[in-house]
Amino acid sequence: MLHTLIKTTEDGRKLEVIGFAIYLDGRLEAVDLTEVKMHPNRRKIAETAPDATHLAGRVTLTREEADAVTAALKEAQQAMLNDPAAIAERFRIAAIWRAREQGIE
């Protein structure tokens, strides 16, 4: 499985793309990015992190970091097309997110 370090937060935690998801300090944070301009709290985010263009869960990202996340996710998707174990991992992550949406954790 591919691991890509995106950045280290101010408090020392690592934001990484592992396979098809974004992890913060080894814990699942997000499976996709949200543009700041589409977020309901965009004004507060702009005040707090003026360079942020995207969010990965609770973590703000600059344009360059968001591009790195997008590239890593695309690379993982290409690798998945050739690897049955990666396909199983994608279904596992989807099941986790579906359970979260339904309030099961």
Image (spheres, grey):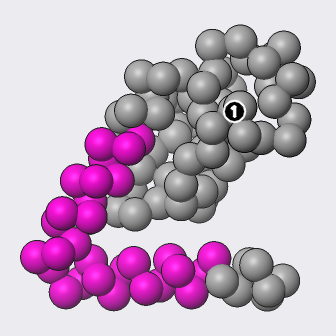
Question: Can see residue 46?
Answer: yes
- From the viewer's perspective, is residue 18 above or below residue 69? below
Q: Is residue 21 above or below residue 86?
A: above
**Residue reaching furthest to the left:** 82
63 on left or right of 76: right
Is residue 73 on the magenta stretch? yes
Expressed as whole percent of the image width and height from the top left, the position of residue 41 reads 87, 35
Given residues 43 and 4, the one toward you in this image is 43
Q: Residue furthest front?
A: 38
Point 77% across, 41% down: residue: 39
The residue sitting at 67% across, 49% down in the picture is 57
Name which residue type carries label 1: Val
Q: Residues within 10 Å of mark 1 (few under 14, many from 20)?
A: some
Q: Nearer the viewer, residue 44 or 10?
A: 44
On-image quarter of the N terminus: bottom left
- Image coords of residue 70 (percent x, y): 38, 44
**Which residues, given as a range, are shown in magenta?**
69-97
Prevailing SS of the magenta stretch: helix
Image quarter in which the C terminus is found: bottom right
Q: Which residue is mark 1?
A: 36
How many callouts does the rendering have?
1
Task: Please say if 41 is above or below 31.
Answer: above
* Percent x, y of residue 101: 76, 78
Q: Quadrant of the rendered structure where residue 97 is?
A: bottom right
Is residue 25 rendered to the left or right of residue 105? left
